[in-house]
Image: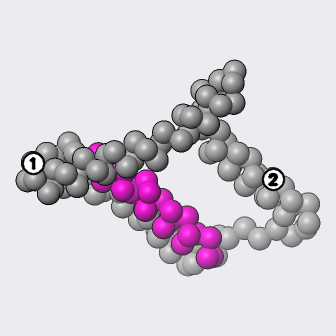
Amino acid sequence: MDPITILAALAPVGVDVVKTILARFTGAEFKPATVNDWLAMQKAELDRFTAINAAGGMNPSYPWVEAVVRLQRPLLGGVVLGVWVWSKTYGVPSDSIDNFASAIGFYLFGDRTLFHIKAKK
């Protein structure tokens, strides 16, 4: 596997580990002092999740078009991982297939793992 791909896959986890270590030693964690501060933080977090959810959308005039586009993502991931399994089964070496499959694999597993690690804090 390409070292750049491995670095790209592990970079978010590494950054989160470094931030956690620095926050532990410096005590730089923000804790809201009032209910209004807490509500402002929650609103900012909700706005961030709304922006992430809306990212990649083409803002179509019909809602079903957006639904079809979003449903194609898992299908595309399945096709890419299927091609990767086929290439490994029949001994067809390809760095491009490996790198693309690792990107899909990190999106499916690495991002979710990082999300669950952050949720437990």
Query: Residue 27: x percent and y percent?
Result: 64, 76
Position of the N terminus, as image quadrant, is: bottom left
Density class for disc 2 (Cα within 10 Å; few <14, some 14-19, many ≥20) is few
Q: Looking at the rendering, which quadrant does residue 109 occupy?
A: bottom left
Instruction: Residue 26: tell me if it is visible.
Output: no
Q: Is residue 9 rendered to the left or right of residue 65?
A: left
Regarding mark 2 in the picture, which secondary structure is present there?
A: helix
| Residue placed under numbered mark 2 in the picture | 43
Q: Position of residue 68 (x, y in %)?
A: 56, 34
Colouring convention used in this rendered image of the protein: one colour
Q: Which mark is residue 92?
A: 1
Q: Position of residue 104 (x, y in %)?
A: 37, 50
Would residue 109 appear left or right of 8 to someone viewing this image? right
Residue 107 seen by the camera: yes
User: Residue sitting at 73 percent across and 55 percent down?
Assistant: 45
Relative image position of residue 33 (x, y in whole percent): 86, 70
37 vs 75, nearest the viewer: 75
Is residue 111 part of the magenta span, yes or no? yes
From the viewer's perspective, is 37 left or right of 85? right
Q: Quadrant of the C terminus?
A: bottom right
Q: Nearer the viewer, residue 105 or 8?
A: 105
State the residue at coordinates (19%, 51%).
Answer: 86
Residue furthest to the top in view is 61
What secondary structure is the stretch in magenta mostly built from? Answer: helix
Q: Secondary structure at mark 1?
A: loop
Task: Work out whether residue 102 or residue 16 is closer to the camera in this orientation and state it.
Answer: 102
For the magenta stretch, what is the residue range? 100-121
Left or right, 107 with respect to 66, comes to left
User: What amino acid is found at the position of numbered circle 2 in the picture?
Assistant: Lys
Give the distance between the C-alpha atoms of the residues marked 1 and 2, in whole angstroms.
50 Å
